[in-house]
Image (spheres, helix red, strand yellow):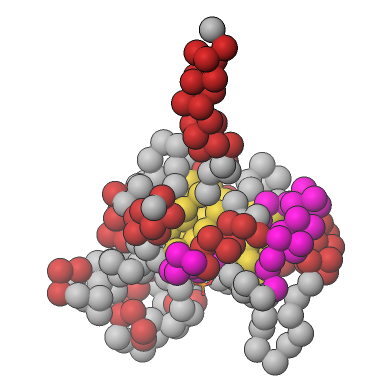
Amino acid sequence: MIRTAITLMAALTPLLAVAAEPKIEIVAHRGASFDAPENTVAAIKLAWEQNADASEFDIFLTKDGQIVVIHDPTTQRTAGVKGTVAEMTLKELRQLDVGKWKGAQFAGEKIPTLDEMLATVPAGKRVFIEVKCGPEIVPELNRVLKASGLKPQQTAIISFHADVIAAVKKARPDLPCYWIVHLAPKGQKPRTAEELIEKAKEIHADGLDLSAHEAILDKTFGDKVKAAGLKLYVWTVNDVELAKKMIAAGAESITTDRPGWLREQLAK
Ligand code: G3P
Ligand code: CA
């Protein structure tokens, strides 16, 4: 009887250990942007195919008040054509090809609208929508999110701009909002957990999305953020050893260009 109980415990221990490990959320950065052109419908669809838990992408407002998905304020790098997103209409932007720079097989990819990206989101998955412009985007953002039919918890808003986070939280307290911070900006002092927590509380952020600086973001730093009731996320990690260090520091999600590959590496 006792021997049976001991054998049963021995068999269950590894299973219990796996169950106790916190699940890390893998977030595709600009879609699966290692393999497909960043911030396109092809990249976000590939992120879902690679079983990402979530996908991040960047948004701007066009001259005619539409929301488009692109990282830079200009079109040169991904479309090979000079132009400023905020000074162009949606029709003008849609004439550009943002796929062919990544490979001939992606020729014809257009700059997506926000609603096109949201239409790809499967049940149980979510997006991290990074607002690259200012709070003037909030009314149109709210309209498109409501029209998408997605649940509020599926559409997290992230931004480097603290005023954007504050404005989104004011308009839509039900949307998860995470403040993005570079922990070691060039020529400035490294950021401290205390100052970030104070600011995050002031703007009503639900969490921090931090650059993965292992010399700054250790377990002591991570514990302070989580003890303050804030989520702790990191970007952009394409190195498995760094990913493990960030998980040890308490990161609950990791943004990566290679969601499928990173999940496989972490499972080894
Ligand atoms: O997830 C945050 C990260 O995307 C911020 O950096 O330059 O890729 O927008 P960036
Ligand atoms: Ca981004």
Q: Quadrant of residue 47?
A: bottom left
Q: Residue furthest bottom?
A: 187
**Position of residue 43 measured from the top left corner of the image (x, y, whole percent):** 32, 61
Question: Considering the image in quadrants, where does the N terminus appear?
Answer: top right
Q: Measured from the top left, where is residue 130 in percent x and y?
A: 54, 63
Q: Magenta stretch: residue 236 in it?
A: yes
Which of the two residues, 171 or 175, is positioned nearer the viewer here?
175
Can residue 16 be seen by looking at this rendering? yes
Q: Is residue 66 visible?
A: no
On the image, the x and y values in percent for residue 252 come to: 59, 51
- Spot the residue most to the top: 1
The x and y percentages for residue 244 are: 53, 60
Q: Please say if 84 is above or below 61.
A: below
Q: How many marks?
A: 0
Q: Which residues are magenta?
A: 216-241
Residue drawn at the location 75% of the way across and 63% of the way down: 221
Foreground pick, 6 / 121: 6
Query: Which residue of the protein is positioned furthest toward the left in this rendering?
Result: 104
Residue at figure coordinates x 34%, y 73% from the top left: 93
Which is more toward the observer, 106 or 195?
Answer: 195
Left or right? Give the position of 178 relative to 198. Answer: left
Q: Is residue 149 left or right of residue 102?
A: right
Q: Is residue 239 magenta?
A: yes
Residue pictured at 80% horizontal, 61% vertical: 197
9 over 97 or under it: above or below: above
Q: Is residue 255 left or right of residue 110?
A: right
Residue 178, by quadrant, is bottom right
Q: Residue at x 70, y 45 (%)?
A: 173
145, 191: nearer the viewer = 191
